[in-house]
Amino acid sequence: MSYRIKEIYFTQQGEGKNTGMEAVFIRFSGCNLWSGKEKHRAKAICNFCDTDFNGIDGINGGKYSKESLLEKVQSLWISSQEQINVVMTGGEPLLQLDQTLVNYFKNHGVYIAIETNGTLEAPSGIDWICVSPKPNTEMVQISGQELKFIYPQTPFSPNQFESLAFDNFFIQPMDSSSYLENLNLSMDFCMANPKWNLSLQTHKILGIR
């Protein structure tokens, strides 16, 4: 099987509980909530996405086998830490990320984190599952290490997810033309709801990938 990858690069995790973790980011092409094309954004289920995941033309993008994908990851790992960390994201990585790829990476000692919209069930063996739920979808992946709610999504409420089996709950202000307002609303929500912590996209603040 081949995997369609938009881009692969070494960086630090910029948001959520693992902020600052060195990792190779693998951005899978495609999503089940938006085509990635601006002409379809207005009618998309998720129309506020801030990521370019369409196609395979990004840095180190292309079609990969599990073997060539691991080789690329290994070639990009420049950390002094021996264990390789990867963050598999998208788009929606679970459209392509399967048990075969997870097993292959785990058999080579790779730490796997994923960022998903939760509409597809994750394979077993993933070390860190971060779910970012979206309105008008059925959430299938209802457990993991982190739930990250992009805020606000009126009338979609973070409170409906508090009983789910996640270890960490984050509110992240929506990146839009109303960002400062969204940031203030996010801080107010976290102060009023102590189960939730604030997540900032520090990579954007610092101007890194």
Image: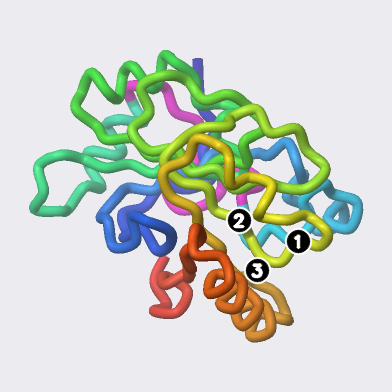
Residue 10 place in picture, x, y as percent: 31, 54
Q: Residue at x 58, y 47 (%)?
A: 162
The main secondary structure of the magenta stretch is loop
Mark 2, Cα crowd under 10 Å, few <14 / some 14-19 / many 20+, is many
**Which quadrant would residue 173 be assigned to in this image?**
bottom right
Residue 179 against residue 190 in the figure, above or below: below
Which residue is disc 2 drawn over?
Answer: 149
85 is within the stretch colored magenta: no
The kind of residue tagged 2 is: Phe
Camera sees residue 40: yes
> In the rendered view of the protein, which quadrant contains the C terminus?
bottom left
Q: Secondary structure at mark 3?
A: loop
Which residue is disc 3 drawn over?
Answer: 174
The answer for how far apart the CA atoms under marks 1 and 2 are is: 9 Å
Residue 92 against residue 108 in the figure, above or below: below
Sequence order check, earlier mark of 1 and 3: 1
The kind of residue tagged 1 is: Gln
Mark carried by residue 153: 1
Residue 14 place in picture, x, y as percent: 40, 63
| Colouring method of the image | rainbow
Residue 118 place in picture, x, y as percent: 62, 36
